[in-house]
Amino acid sequence: MLLQLLLALALGFAVSQLASLVTTVYLHRTLAHRAIRLSPALAFASRVVVWITTGLRPREWAAVHRRHHAFTDAEGDPHSPRLLGWVRVQLTNAALYRRAARDGTTVRRYARDIPADRWDRVLFDRSWLGLALGITILVVVLGPVWGLVAAVWHVGCYLSLNAAVNSLGHTFGRQPQDNPATNLQWLAWLTGGEGLHNNHHHAPTTAKLAFRSWEIDPAWPVIWSLRRLGWATVRHEHPPRQSDGSPPSARAA
């Protein structure tokens, strides 16, 4: 039983890491900020992985995140720990996200360039179906009991880590750039680089979130490999500079 439990926890965590990787590469860097462009086949595959591991609707995720950049830690930010407290954001991040995504204005205003297509209408907008398929795969691999254990552990890990980027990533850590977000390398290890949040707010259209030699963006080797294979193009690898030589605005979306 102990071995089965450990296997279920390991597989659940692996799935959460896969979901985090696709979240940062596809939902965040590709869709929300256009820092990367994926080949059509890889973009579609990413949509499938997001669907069965998180149930998220990509255009909603992008819209909520773009709104966060438009009102970072100010009135209008859907999940600011400076307004709500980092504990509340950590514990209720999913509810805060859902409230913004379904408020009737956020998606319409911030995701005009990501309209729903026929695949969304048939499959990807049916979050329950994607999650059910993902759970079914775990149940087939591990059996009904341990498959459900793995699924619950995956959901808990994924939600907690994503919440930490919004809560801890605006409260604790280093701020080498002049913006409200922070860098936490340990969190970056667990979230595909998202813990380098201060760097990201400094230059949102930069595909690589590690700016210094001692910083590590775990998703970057994946992006670099995809680029080498011709499956992805990168808008900026390093923080761009404006025509006057000054760094980009931290609030650019």
Image (cartoon, rainbow, N blue to C red):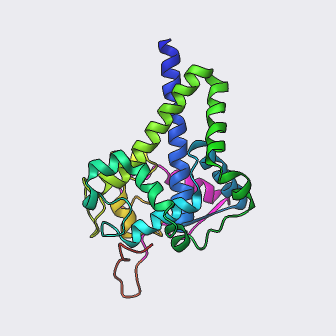
The correct choice, above or below, for 173 with respect to 70 in the image is: above
Residue 22 horizontal/vertical position (percent): 56, 50
| Quadrant of the rendering where the C terminus is positioned | bottom left
Question: 219 or 139, which lies in front?
Answer: 139
State which region is magenta: 212-240
- Residue 214 colored magenta? yes
Question: 176 or 71, which lies in front?
Answer: 71
Quadrant assignment, res 174 = bottom left
Residue 2 horizontal/vertical position (percent): 47, 13
Question: Residue shown at 42%/51% (left/top)?
Answer: 95
The correct choice, above or below, for 49 with respect to 236 in the image is: above
Describe residue 90's horizontal placement relative to residue 144 as left or right.
left
The correct choice, above or below, for 143 with respect to 107 in the image is: above
Residue 228 visible to the viewer: yes
Question: Residue shown at 31%/62% (left/top)?
Answer: 181
Quadrant assignment, res 224 = bottom right
